[in-house]
Image (tube, helix red, strand yellow):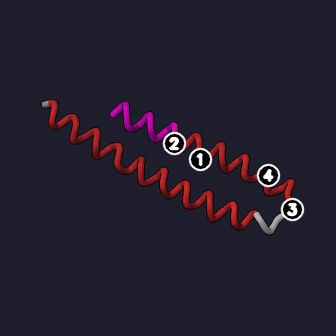
Amino acid sequence: MRYAHATRTAFSCQPSAISRQLSAVSINLYLKLLSSMTPCVSIQLSAISYQLLNNTIKHSFNLCYVS
């Protein structure tokens, strides 16, 4: 029983790790796009994107440990 539970937890953690990597890549591309904008707008949008990334990571960790 312990092995089955550990395997299920590992599988539930793997997609969340992939989603964190994809979020980080998309944030990097987004920030490169923002570099052509005015500083004030880019700072505000990068703060919003950081909050979204932070919430995504917290949510994926919660899914990982609850499963």
Give the class, few, some or many, for how many residues have Cα within 10 Å of label 2's Cα (few <14, many ≥20).
some
Closer to the N terminus: mark 3 or mark 4? 3
Whichever of callouts 2 and 3 sits on the residue coming sooner in the sequence is: 3
Residue designated by label 3 = 38
As shown in the figure, which amino acid type bears the numbered disc 2? Ile
Q: Quadrant of the C terminus?
A: top left
Tell me if 31 is positioned left or right of 7 in this view: right
At label 1, the amino acid type is Leu
* CA distance separating discs 2 and 3: 28 Å
How far separated are the C-alphas under marks 4 and 1?
15 Å
The residue to which callout 4 is attached is 43
Residue with the most extreme left position: 1
Corner quadrant of residue 37: bottom right
Q: Position of residue 23 (x, y in %)?
A: 54, 54
Magenta-tinted stretch: 58-67
For disc 4, the neighbor class at 10 Å (few under 14, some 14 to 19, many from 20) is some
Q: Is residue 27 magenta?
A: no
Helix, strand or loop at mark 3? loop
Q: Upstream in the sequence, badge 4 or badge 2?
A: 4
Residue 4, x across and y down, in percent: 16, 37
The 10 Å Cα crowd at callout 3, few under 14, some 14 to 19, many 20 or more, is: few
Q: Measure the alpha-carbon separation of dots 4 and 2.
A: 21 Å
Question: Does residue 59 belong to the magenta stretch?
Answer: yes
Labels 1 and 3: the sequence-earlier one: 3
Q: Which residue is mark 2?
A: 57
Q: Secondary structure at mark 1?
A: helix
Of callouts 4 and 1, the N-terminal one: 4
**C-alpha separation, residue under disc 2 versus residue under disc 1:** 6 Å
What secondary structure is marked by label 2? helix
Vertical arrangement, residue 31 with respect to residue 50, above or below: below
SS at mark 4?
helix
The residue that mark 1 highlights is 53
